[in-house]
Amino acid sequence: MSDQLPDRLSTDPRSPYYNEAILSRDVGIRFKGVEKTNVEEYCVSEGWVRVTAGSSKDRYGNPLTIKLTGAVEPYFRDQK
């Protein structure tokens, strides 16, 4: 497997950007220089992340998310 992370990645298995092989390697996200642990999806080229909004759920039981814009830096935690 490559050590290159994709431009866009999601933790939702229903998303076309979901990749189980990459997520199994423990991906970390720095957003605006701060480590984020609640990121559901990110896009480096467009500069945004989707983070969970507390413990709120939509009517289907999925977590509600908020889209934040800024510098996104994904990395593999095992390569620190």
Image (tube, grey):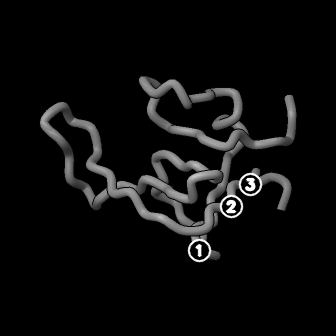
Q: Of helix, strand and loop, which one carries label 2?
A: strand
Circle 1 sits on which residue?
32
At a point 55% along the width and 31% down the height, the residue shown is 17
Find residue 70 and report its image quarter. Answer: bottom right
Label 1 vs 2, first from the N-terminus: 1
Going by the numbered disc 1, the residue's amino acid type is Lys
Check if mark 3's residue and mark 2's residue have beta carbons within 8 Å.
yes
Q: CA distance from mark 3 to mark 2?
A: 7 Å
At a point 86% along the width and 34% down the height, the residue shown is 2
Circle 2 sits on which residue?
73
Going by the numbered disc 3, the residue's amino acid type is Tyr
On residue 75, the disc is: 3
Going by the numbered disc 2, the residue's amino acid type is Glu
Q: Is residue 69 above or below residue 76?
A: below
Q: Residues within 10 Å of mark 2 (few under 14, many from 20)?
A: some
Q: Of helix, strand and loop, which one carries label 1?
A: loop
At a point 62% along the width and 27% down the height, the residue shown is 20
Taking the image as shown, residue 50 lies to the left or right of residue 25, namely left
Taking the image as shown, residue 79 lies to the left or right of residue 46, namely right
Q: CA distance from mark 1 to mark 3?
A: 14 Å
Estimate the x, y position of residue 34 in percent, counting from the top left. 59, 75
